[in-house]
Amino acid sequence: MGQDMLSTLLSAPNVETWAFYLLTTLSICLAIGVLVDRVVIRSGFILIAVFGTISGIFLLLSAQFLALAQIMIYAVGITLMVVIALMLTNPRLEREQLIVYSDESLPPLAKLFASCKRNLNLWVAVLSFVTLYAALIGENHWPLSDQPVSKDAVQVLGEALVTNYSIPFEFASVLLLAALMGAIMLAKGEPKNKVEDGDLTIVDETKKQENNLALQR
Amino acid sequence: MFSNGDEIFKISRLTIVWLAGIFTIVWMVCWALGIALPMLLTQQLGDKAALTNEILRAATPVIAILVFIPINAMFMVLIERRALALWTVRKGPNRVGPDGNFQTAADAVKLLLKEDITPTGADAVMHTFAPILFFAPSVFGAVPLLAAVTNNHPLFRVLNLPTGIFFVLAAGALPVVALVMAGWASNNKYSLVGGLRSAAQAISYEIPLVLSLITVCLMAGTLDLVKITEQQAGGILNWNLLGGGALTGLNNALAGGGAKALATSYFMGPISYVCAGLLVISLIISFWLYLTGACAEINRIPFDLPEAESELVSGYNTEYSGMKFAIFFLAEFTNLFIVSSITTVMFLGGGDNPIPPYILNNIPGIPQMVAAIRDSYFCSTLHIINPETFFATLWVIAKVYGLVIFAVLIRGTLPRFRIDQLMAFGWKRLIPLSLIVFIIVVFAREFVICHG
């Protein structure tokens, strides 16, 4: 009896659907946890779990390579973010403080403006969510392929990256290279050896020029 | 000849006895769960047992890993301490049991019975969760390796993934998170510094590690671990260590193909020979790059900065005790084992015999011996010994534990890096070197027909 029930459960066509709902619920709960948690570091670690569940959804869509790439990149990437957060904040000394807003004396319009300004992030989030949702729902133009998933999906992905999508791929790598070089430039310290007075002015002038260029951009 | 020949003999005896014990136990568990029990159930219940049998077979590899990890870690700790004692001319563990061989068993009992302390002000949930997150990847990261190291045994074949090596790498990226988590949750400055160091170190050394494995995958043309192993079959000249198949033409010529086989594989004449030589050098370099990167990735001396005793008490695991510390300890040794297995599968031909078959089959007695094993009652009826798997696994065990002993030798030989030396070595030496090797392999492989 029990065995029959188990087999019906396992062979039911909607196991994937159940797994999808489970993963989605989990990821939404964890995402709320990221927002709600007052400790920055802990919410960083919860964010890793969110990306873990999203990679589970990728697995359900039989995109094994993407799921693994998601884990590999985000696990390390978010760890770095957590480390940076650790260095920039001091969560142990920060106690939760009630934020008191002193806009009671303002006129109503200014109060509204102040509230909008304060909740700018919220409005941006709401607007972008509505836009994305409308774009996803409004037109059903996502082509559904009835072809079976290729067994060697990695090969298909690799071929697509160097043929059809080679230009976006190259642009992404150029962008990353630029970011890397920028990081190196930022991390490069001042030259330690003392230079002659004449040289110093030249160095200073070139620096000024660089700064101006950066500002212009 | 050797003044410490006695100790060397004791260590060899210990290794052989323990390894035989470990793998007999693990294989008996696998056999009982995956083969004997389903056979019995089918005999008794007939078709009704089909689903149960499926579940049993699916659970076998995981249970095998879970049985294997603790006894393997116990053995590795013991052999590491004894071998270190041998190389640094000290006395190793010598009190508990004969020759001190029960020392790690006693340690395990002590760790299990110790009080589990959570320090004041620590984040209790994260503090508990960190060892779990550190240990879990080493369990499920080992899963795709099983099919590759057992020569695609039917019990473990289901676990083979088309993205095998990438899965292992993704699992290997997770412990960093756990170390930062452990360091932060302990409410201890030393732990925090250890966690931060481990993050910096793992991220820097993951690049040469992944690049060296990518070089191998490029030569193999696949990410599938079983395919990579199968390509390397047929003697030491086919192994990825020696050019990733660049010497296959030479191997074929030696096997009887003569000058014709050479001309097919090295179709461009002298250019091909030069490229084959370049491939051999590049792949040997990337083997050492992988070993170095892996050593840093699993925090072993000379890269054990996250737990440098002289500076940081014990680094990220300072505040851990009892079972949680035991899990950290277990995972570290399991990671060493997994790294050695990856090296074996990717570079050293997996379960391949280094002596090529055209020599082996001409030695009198060996083909007859294999045939006798295959026809015996154990093999043909009870399926206790599968000859394809049996010899492959013996080679895998020899290679993997050879690498483990090599890692212990490194630990006994080299001093610890300083943190700036570590970073400079990683970013200024290893990463450029691995990129150069990668570029050379990309171009050189066009002029040689590799792997037949």
Image (spheres, rainbow, N blue to C red):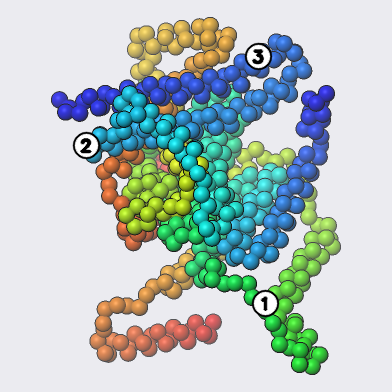
Instruction: Tell if the residue under mark 2 belongs to the same chain as the one under mark 3.
Output: yes
Give me the C-alpha separation between circle 3 and circle 1.
68 Å
> Height in image: A187 above or below A110?
above
x 43%, y 86%: residue: A209
Disc 2 is placed on an element classified as loop
Label 2: which residue?
Answer: B89
At horizontal 48% and vertical 84% (from top left) the residue drawn is A213
Compared to residue A112, the image places residue B394 above or below, namely: above
| Callout in the foreground (1, 2) | 1
Residue drawn at the location 34% of the way across and 61% of the way down: B420
Viewer-side residue, B126 vs B64: B126
Label of residue B308 in the image: none
* Residue named by callout 1: A98
* Chain that bears disc 3: B
> How many badges with numbers are in the image?
3
Dot 3: what SS?
helix
* Three-letter amino acid code at the position of disc 3: Met
Q: Determine crowd level at label 3: few under 14, some 14-19, many 20+ residues with C-alpha closer than 10 A.
A: some
| Residue B273, quarter of the rendered image | top left
> Where residue B356 sits: x, y (%)?
38, 22
Amino acid identity at mark 1: Leu
Q: Does residue B359 show up?
A: yes
Three-letter residue code for mark 2: Val
Question: Residue A167 at what x, y percent from top left?
Answer: 59, 61
Check disc 3 and report the residue beneath it.
B39
The earlier-in-sequence mark between 2 and 3 is 3
Q: Residue furthest left?
A: B1
Under circle 1, the secondary element is: loop
- In the picture, measured across the screen, residue A149 lies left or right of residue B18, that is right
